Image (spheres, helix red, strand yellow):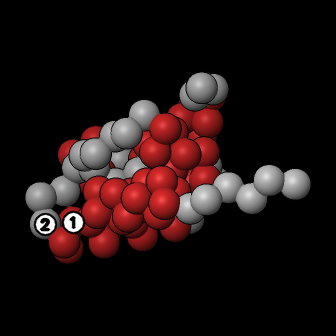
């Protein structure tokens, strides 16, 4: 998968530990930065495709990504 988007992520100017928080407050702080990030969508897809289960990626927490993956697994594709 293309990873050029990483160079445009707002997290590149923040301490990496900020995106691997240990509590809910830290998660919300990281998510606020992601909310303004121009590469939020590819970042989230990267984390989902690579099953990254630690940290905040694409504005989502670990729990949120687990839910998205679970939902995708159970969604039956519509054939056209
Ligand atoms: S969405 Fe968040 S984690 Fe992803 S590149 Fe942007 S700031 Fe970094």
Residue drawn at the location 48% of the way across and 60% of the way down = 74
Instruction: Answer left or right for 18 relative to 76.
Output: left
Residue 37 in view, yes or no: no
Residue identified by numbered label 2: 23
Q: Quadrant of residue 4?
A: top right
Name the residue carrying label 1. Answer: 26
Quick check: can you spot residue 74? Answer: yes
**Mark 1 Cα-neighbour bin, 10 Å: few <14, some 14–19, many ≥20:** some
Measuring from the top left, give residue 61's x and y in whole percent: 32, 61
Q: What element carries label 1?
A: helix
Q: How many labels does the image show?
A: 2
Q: Classify mark 2 as within 8 Å of ligand 1 or not, answering yes or no.
A: no
Mark 2 neighbour density, 10 Å: few (under 14) some (14–19) many (20 or more): few
Q: Which residue is drawn at 46% across and 45% down?
A: 48
Tell me residue 23's x, y (percent): 13, 66
Q: Is mark 2 on a helix, strand or loop?
A: loop
Above or below, 26 against 65 in this view is: below
Residue 63 locus on image (x, y percent): 28, 63
Q: How far apart are marks 1 and 2 (CA)?
A: 5 Å
Q: Vertically, is 34 above or below 15?
A: below
* The N terminus lies in quadrant: top right
Q: Which of 57 and 13 is in front in this view?
A: 57
In the displayed structure, would residue 60 be above or below residue 8? below
Q: Given contact means CB atoms under 8 Å apart, are the residues at marks 1 and 2 in contact?
A: yes
Quadrant containing the C terminus is bottom right
Q: Which residue is drawn at 12% across and 58% down?
A: 22
Drawn side of residue 54 relative to residue 36, left or right? left
Which residue is most to the right? 80
Residue 61, label in figure = none
Residue 41 location (% of width, % of height): 61, 53
Q: Judge left or right: residue 12 versus residue 39.
A: left
Quadrant of the rendered image containing residue 52: top left
């Amino acid at each position: 998968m293309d990873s050029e988007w990483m160079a445009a992520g707002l997290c590149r100017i923040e301490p990496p530990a900020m995106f691997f928080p240990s509590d809910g407050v830290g998660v919300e702080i990281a998510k606020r930065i992601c909310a303004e990030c121009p590469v939020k969508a590819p970042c989230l897809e990267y984390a989902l495709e690579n099953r990254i289960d630690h940290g905040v990626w694409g504005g989502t927490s670990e729990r949120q990504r687990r839910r998205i993956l679970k939902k995708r697994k159970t969604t039956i594709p519509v054939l056209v």
